[in-house]
Amino acid sequence: MMLLAAGFDPTLLSLVIVGFVIICLVILLRFFKQPYIIAYILAGVLLGEHGFNIIEEKDTVQHAGEFGLILLLFFIGMEISLPNLLKTWKIATIGTMIQILSSVSFVALIGPFFNLEINQIIILGLVISLSSSAVVIKLLQDNEELGSITGQNVVSILLMQDILIVPMLIFTSYLGGENPSTATILGQIFGGLLIIGGIVWVAKKKEINIPFSEAIEKDHELQVFLAGIICFGFALITAFLGLSAALGAFVAGIFVHATRSTEWFHDSLHAFRVVFVAFFFISIGILIDLTFLVANWQLILSLLVAAYLTNHFINASILHYYGRNWQLSLYGGALLAQIGELGFILIATAFNTGIISTFSYQLGIIIISLSLLVSPFWITLTRRFVKKDKPLSNTSSLIKMTKE
């Protein structure tokens, strides 16, 4: 009471508690050689509204998490070699389409057992087909595998999924009886063409010069603001055009990579990235309703295992078809086996348009959340199963990130 009377902000106490819990969980999980992602999600579970309810500003955390996703994709773009990425266009386009069709077909097979209607089958199939860019690329960076052959293949598939989320959302709106306006559709088409044109231009240009680059490299404060403007500016443009803000940040990172100035961009925003990415995964943990989980654990467990096995098998088969041996293919399949964060957006759209019920929505939210939580364990088990102690290819990793 004395603290409150003195003008003490309870939010400050919440932040301190969140930081303390994360540190404790990280220390514990490092003992078991698990990534920080799990600590962030568990912190959200423990401190969220379904846990001890320490974090009362749920919307604030979710907004901070959105910034984290934008920053994460920006950093990813800075580490991507565009020429190497373009070499994998076949697996990105054809492989991703096969994966989507296979996921929808799988749900169609089990649909009658759960009394699913055709619209629900399509939506759940699309949700299952989406993998997590945030989780997968973070793990690839931590393992210094982002620049390896399989790492590039996985990233190309993830990028194609991020692009296809736009037509998926439009299609979902149509299934629910809501038709997007002509202006919205034209804006999204223009945005897609703008991104493609920019990528082609960067690929031909190969290197871009930043005006006054020498003066900027000597001014750290100016670097922070310039890096923030480029990252969030691109995100703002794509969001305005009806596309994913995170996709815009990813493209911005590709542009920065072409400037050969990634080092000071990385140093300028790295601390912000660590904090906001943590909030992104905390916001996922907050969504996990432990009461709903306990009441429906058998159904949730069955669907979770089915989704993992299906995604793992489908993606491993696709990677194997495009020339990877089974060892690399199984590992790549594990990386793509989880259901991604974009699934939250898609299933929320389906719920708001009346395609799925409240129960189905809650079920989908918790399965996606648990899928992201389980993913690092699943990937680690697969690595041990295929006896992988080195990077994803027989060539050395092209990129070495500074570990957090």
Image: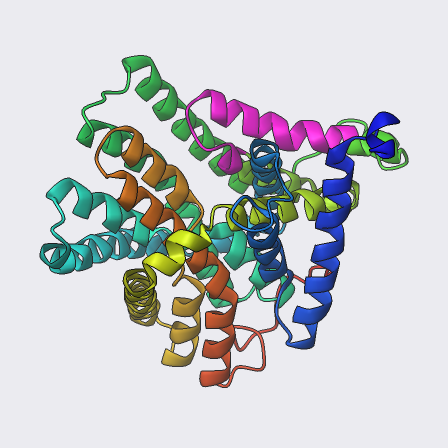
Residue found 58% across the figure and 79% down from its top: 390
Q: Position of residue 386 (x, y in %)?
A: 45, 83
Residue found 62% across the figure and 51% down from its top: 79
Which image quadrant is residue 166 in?
top left
Residue 386 seen in the figure: no
Residue 250 seen in the figure: yes
Please state which of residues 29 and 345 is positioned toward the viewer in this rendering. 29
Q: Position of residue 198 (x, y in %)?
A: 50, 32
Q: Main secondary structure of the magenta part?
A: helix
Residue range highlighted in magenta: 225-248
Residue lying at the far front of the rendered structure: 1
Image color mode: rainbow
**174 sits left or right of 65 in the view:** left
Q: Position of residue 365 (x, y in %)?
A: 38, 47
**318 sits left or right of 197 in the view:** left
Q: Position of residue 321 (x, y in %)?
A: 29, 69
- Residue 244 in magenta stretch: yes
Residue found 36% across the figure and 79% down from its top: 326
Please state which of residues 311 and 31 is positioned toward the viewer in this rendering. 31
| Residue 111 to residue 247: above or below | below
Residue found 38% across the figure and 63% down from its top: 337
**310 sits left or right of 59 in the view:** left
Please state which of residues 202 and 391 is positioned toward the viewer in this rendering. 391
Which part of the image, by quadrant, shows the N terminus? top right
